[in-house]
Image: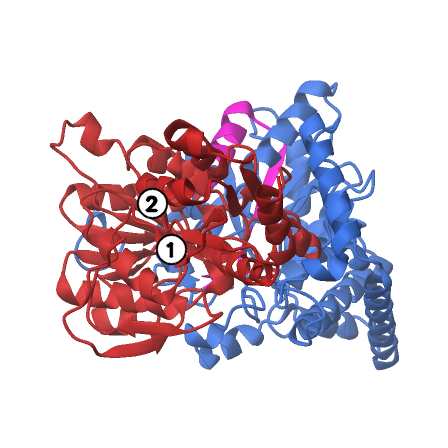
Chain colours: A red, B blue
Amino acid sequence: MSTQTPDTEATQSLTLVQAVRDGLATEMQRDEDVVVMGEDVGKNGGVFRATEGLYDEFGEERVIDTPLAESGIVGTAVGMAAMGMKPVAECQFSGFMYPGFDQIVSHMPRLRTRSRGRYTCPMVLRAPFGGGIRAPEHHSESKEAFYAHEAGLKVAIPSTPYDTKGMLTAAIRDPDPVVFLEPKLIYRAFRGDVPEEPYEVPLGEAAVRREGTDVSVFTYGAMTRPTLDAAEELADDGIDAEVVDLRSVSPLDRESIVESFQKTGRACVVHEAPKTGGLAGEITATLQEEALLYQEAPIQRVTGYDVPYPLYALEDYYMPNEARVAEGIRDAVEF
Amino acid sequence: MNPTHGAGRRPAILTKTLCRESGRFRYAKVGTVSTLERDPTEDMVRVLDEDGGVVGDVPDLDNDELVEMYRQMKLARHFDERAVSLNRQGRMGTYPPLSGQEGAQIGSAMAMADDDWMIPSYREHAAALVRGQGLTETLRYWMGDERGDSPDEGTNVFTVAVPIASQIPHATGMAWAEKLQSDGDHGAFLCYFGDGATSEGDFHEGLNFAGVFDTPNVFFCNNNQWAISVPRERQTASDTLAQKAQAYGFEGVQVDGMDPLAVYSVTREALQKARDPEEEQPRPTMIEAVQYRFGAHTTADDPSVYRTDEEEERWRAKDPIPRLESYLQSQGVLDDDRIEAIQASVEDEVADAIDEAEATADPDPQSMFDHVYAEQTPELREQAERFAQLREKHGDDAFQIE
């Protein structure tokens, strides 16, 4: 769980979305092959301002407003990446990635395999994801499992401004394609110190956000905060929960997951994505495979429900919250 | 510059347009400069000029119908202004405004017959209103309530489609089904989408199927010049959107989308052809209604970042409402008293709709588990029960996200 530290100590206090912008800017300054492309990423600076100012700084050939066509965005990024560029393509919301799905599953992850390494696809596909912002239909889903299911893709989900810049930098430098999902509920929820210099937070490494001995709680993205809140609430009742922020859902940091569970023997997994086929199932199976004899209670899943994400009048009921997370942790502890 | 255009001037492109006199399609030369720069009323079907003067054949609408068209447009405009304001006051979520586009929506919706269908994207609440979808329902939808997108039986309005262009193949499929299931006497299916949608694969596939299977469709493109911040000329290097129809084997026509009478005429003709074509005549048509959204893409958008006041002013001069108003006044169909009375009535109607929408209780949280399948699965039933227990134990306040 190490983090490569930057060369200088100058930091800035940024929100998560500002850290996205900063990560893009510093890599674009460092490497001319890095280009940003997508709908409204140029002049408009992105609908969440994630690319604000980049158009003025780097010009229209490196910050590219594309036609409204996700298959075109992802597919041309695959082609550019094959020719040695480092495109960072944006889908405006993860709910609009699906017209590009064929490219995401049929080509992004398979170029290396298919060509036996002759061609590669060192691109990043960014998208804001997750619920809780009172948005219209298709603007709130969490479908990270689709992408984690695809061999050849890496799937990163930061939860802090520091990790956002570091993981985005690592994703851009990665020799393989990375789907970079940004939890938009916490785009501006809080600030954190972010070094001005570029630095990498390695993909595939989890971070322990709270150490504890009674139960391991695995989560990521926007669910990290309510999970930590629930852990603090339970501390008052004498339950000492360890909270592990996975940060990457593919590859999973199996070592950290197993290590934490070996210590506690109990686990609860929290994500907003629906229960069936979600990452919680994968984590549970990993624990069964790797640490069965340490297990002292059924592993709890606190997740979104197996229903289409409701329009916003009901979304608060859909998303796991502090009360539900606390309930799940208790069930694991009090079994 | 597209290299195939060669050096120097770009060649003129010939586009089929609807001939006002004969009702047949003819070829007209379209402009060779950017749509935004050129006069958008050049080379396209129109009936009224910017001042409401008659420059084409006025469609056969009686005075009541003309006044109704005007009233619907005023209603839509007032509704739109109030809806934006509700969002600003935190009483409603993100909302996509339609001001400037009333002529295209109401002109086309009024051209539809009872048996026709409309397949919207997400900005066509004015057209939906003409087709019988209430303002209260529209408000409820944008207030995050699923029940607002459940049109009454017989309304022939399909659900809102947020992902761009995704509804176009549905429209083709629905029209195709109607053709296959009927004995030849059937309605037409009008699908709305925007200029940005023409860049998506679904646009190509939907129109291509329509051409191949000769489905009774009208593909109505509300070209409002901007897909959020991306201008029309960034969507395609072709001179017009309408000309894309030629590649699918049917007619494309550009109409002044801010001229409700021209939109009505063109749409009526296209719908009629879809229902009952002449021999060898393809059923589908694509209509490009050239227009402008006066406001933002949605209330979450700020157009001042990407377009100029000057441009907005140029298009505001083409506002469809004063145009029709001037025409109706010149014909003696409307006078100041009537205009005032209409304004007062639309204000009341919108106020009532807002009151009703806000007085409607939020949907039951348990309804989240309804309508997922015809019959709830055992797993889902268990999740719903567990959810009910949690609500009982913690109270609904515990579920509110800060």
Disc 1 and disc 2 in contact, CB within 8 angstroms:
yes
Badge 2 density bin: few <14, some 14–19, many ≥20, Cα 10 Å: some
Identify the residue at horizontal 54%, vertical 64% (top origin).
B297
Q: Is residue B222 magenta?
A: yes
State whether residue A75 appears in this view. Answer: yes
Residue A269 percent location from the top left of the image: 51, 44
Residue A118 percent location from the top left of the image: 11, 32
- Tell me whether marks 1 and 2 sit on the same chain: yes
- SS at mark 1 in the image: strand
Residue A208's tag is 1
Residue A188 percent location from the top left of the image: 47, 70
Residue A256's tag is 2
Please state which of residues B402 and B143 is positioned toward the viewer in this rendering.
B402
Magenta residue span: B203-228
Above-or-below relation of B148 to B229: above
Badge 1 density bin: few <14, some 14–19, many ≥20, Cα 10 Å: some
Q: Is residue B141 magenta?
A: no
Among the 4 quarters of the image, the one containing residue A332:
top right
Q: Image check: B225 left or right of A163?
A: right
Specify the subunit that label 2 lies on. A
State whether residue B107 appears in this view. Answer: no
Identify the residue at horizontal 34%, vertical 68% (top origin).
A19
Above-or-below relation of B240 to B51: above
Please state which of residues A68 and B308 is positioned toward the viewer in this rendering.
A68
Q: Image check: B161 left or right of B370?
A: left
Above-or-below relation of B246 to A217: above
Which amino acid, by three-letter code, is at mark 2?
A: Ser
